[in-house]
Amino acid sequence: MRVDTRLEELGLGDLGDVGQSEFSGLAERHRRELHVHCYRMLGSFEDAEDTVQETFLRAWRRRETFEGRSTFRAWLYRIATNACLDLLAKRRPEPATGGEVPWLQPYPDRLLDEVPAGDADEPEAVAVARETIELAYLVAVQHLAPRPRAVLILRDVLGWPAKDVAELLGDSVNSVNSALQRARAGMREHLPAERQDWTGDEEDAATLDVVRRFSEATVAIDIDGLTSLLRDDVRCSMPPTPGLQVGRDSVVNDWVQDGFESMSGLRAVGTSVNRQPALGFYQWDEREGAYLPLTLDVLRITGGAVTEITTFHADRFAQVGLPERLPADGAE
């Protein structure tokens, strides 16, 4: 049963008659999609979690201000957007620059799947559409100033009318439309050159084959094999570590300088984050007698080649559901 239908059945206009337990039940149904919304705004999985909690706290405290002019869902989105803007003003008043987002964190697909399934044009489905959750999109969004970022997400991702966005931000419709045009222009500067690079179809056999070959070449420390899988203009980053590498030669040289060829004892486990294939790499630790987390590589694959590698540190393994260690070969 949808939350808005439940409110109508209760005959409520301002939520004033709802107890805390019932209010929590109504709000919790929207937790995951609100978390995704905050994640788009903030780029950080952990900051998004904190902001959703703040959203629910503000909503409960202000429940009597809900007048029923919009849906309960839209009311929560308004509160969540303002909570995100408040956090950005305190922690990150300046947007990302130079193609890097140091605070970027991955979003596990298993959690994206918690958003209720529905038709492609239903609000919940739109909220987690693949083309607006992939890392390339997230990186581009984080290069926008906070308010244009909010306008873009509310208008182009969630499909809000300009007048509703203007009301939320305390701006005029003309100001919102102007901000949207600037935001779209900014996105074009930071998204892949061809839009289809990040709006592709579901993984096909060719894509899965590239992932397999990338995994095998990495475990085998096969530089030539890895090089053959990279597109000429491949991009590689490792948030929060600064340093964006662009181009096959630059990426491979960086790997060599970091001592990749001298590594050994690697294993890989496949997963998926941000609707993209990902590989958790482990390295053998003699003292622990097990393979321990090393890095999480998230891949963007276009036309049978790797076009982007975003490498996250081992502290992301638990978040994306990867095991904390792998046993020795042949162990139970």
Image (cartoon, grey):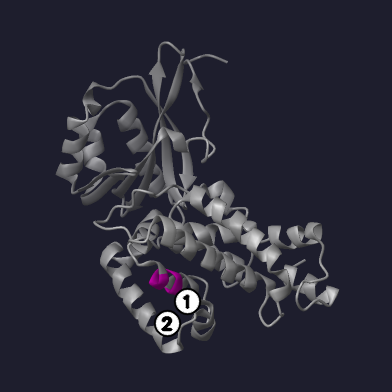
Q: As rendered, which of 216 and 190 lies closer to the eye?
A: 190
x and y percentages locating residue 1 in the rendered image: 77, 66
x and y percentages locating residue 115 in the rendered image: 62, 58
Circle 1 residue: 155
Secondary structure beneath label 1: helix
x and y percentages locating residue 244 in the rendered image: 24, 47
* Most common SS among magenta residues: helix
Query: Magenta span has 181?
Result: no
Secondary structure beneath label 2: helix
Q: Mark 2 or mark 1, which has the lower sequence index? A: 1
Q: Mark 2 belongs to which amino acid?
A: Val
Do residues under tags 2 and 1 come within 8 Å of each other at their CB atoms? yes
Instruction: Identify the mark at residue 176; answer none if there is no mark.
Output: 2
Please give the range of residues in magenta: 147-151
Q: Is residue 201 visible?
A: no
Q: Mark 1 belongs to which amino acid?
A: Arg
x and y percentages locating residue 102 in the rendered image: 34, 48
